[in-house]
Amino acid sequence: MINRPTRQRELRAPGRGKSLGRAHARLALCLTERDRWILRMCHEHRVLTTPQLTALTFGSPSRARRRLAALYDYGVLERFRPLCAIGTAPTHWVLAQAGAAVLAAQAGIELRELGFRPDRALAVAHSLHLAHTVGLNDWFTTLATTAPASANAALLAWWSENRCRALWGDLVIPDGYGRYTHAGSTLDFFLEFDLATMALPTVAGKLHGYAELARTSGIVTPVLVWLPVGSREAAARKALHDTWIRLGDPEAVPVATAAADLLSTHPAASPAAPVWLGLDSADGSRVALHTLAAQWPRVTPAPASVPVAPHSRYTVLTPPPPCPPPGAGEW
């Protein structure tokens, strides 16, 4: 009542910290290795949708929905569904505070050292960059899940924009970094994922940062620019080429472009398909992703081991742990 306002101390539940500790301890019995992998991926990439997690870890939509709902009930994941002008958006999943506590405990660090902010986790639901983040994660998810096993193809590493910013942000901030292997050929690459929301001179201007990164690190890594339609790609190639030829050492910044509308509508269509066109291509022929490195002799060969980001407790890998056998208690 207005004449007897509630005191703050009256809102504090006695033993709250102790109860929360017990809840975290009980998670040790509930969470599988795969669950923890999902938590790490949601922390790394900010937000993943049900279809993305289904493709990456489950294969079965019904199985994915049941397990993700359980992780929500455990309090380790949060969820939201953005409003769509047409149709219905899938459920989007982000790391919850209890999930962050699990990751911090597993890494042997304090929660603040993990870089998790509960007030920012769900803020992505209102971010003007949500479509870009989800689209970027779709790109990497598709690359990972359509890699042909017959060619020993796989996405070995997938780093987020936040991780790239922490490593190279003083020079350039890629939308993502990846390592892809196919039939014994391995390619490291930076990805610029374009949704036609940024002015093309701004996109092209990022090549200066990549040139400085190559100069200071001595490592030549291709830059892949993915665009939504062919007309945007044609305009982007002109802007990119005008900037590229003015670099001090253009060959230290290999660039290739591709457009999404070059892919077929088949569910197995992949960004690894022969849709890539080098900025310095002489004959204008498009090639597959894994063959790009052979076109640029100065590209630094990928080391044999999977890269681990400095100052990170985790190697960010796409392949999840093996699916638990039936009757293992997860489902």
Image: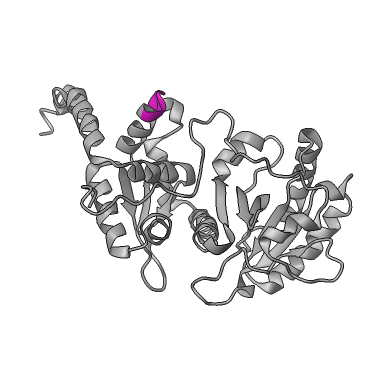
Q: Is residue 130 left or right of residue 172?
A: left
Residue 277 visible in the picture: yes
Task: Look at the image and tell me in which quarter the N terminus lies.
Answer: top left
Residue 279 x %, y %:
80, 61
Query: What residue is shown at x 75% (from left), y 43% (from top)?
Result: 209
Question: Residue 110 colored magenta?
Answer: yes
Residue 227 x %, y %:
65, 64
Q: Residue furthest bottom?
A: 265
Q: Which residues are magenta?
A: 106-111
Residue 199 visible in the picture: no
Q: Is residue 234 above or below residue 164?
A: below
Query: What residue is shown at x 32% (from left), y 51% (from top)?
Result: 79
Q: How is the image coloured?
A: one colour
Question: Residue 168 colored magenta?
Answer: no
**Residue situated in front as seen by the camera: 71 or 155:** 155
| Residue 165: quarter of image | top right
Residue 220 x %, y %:
77, 44
| Residue 161: quarter of image | top right
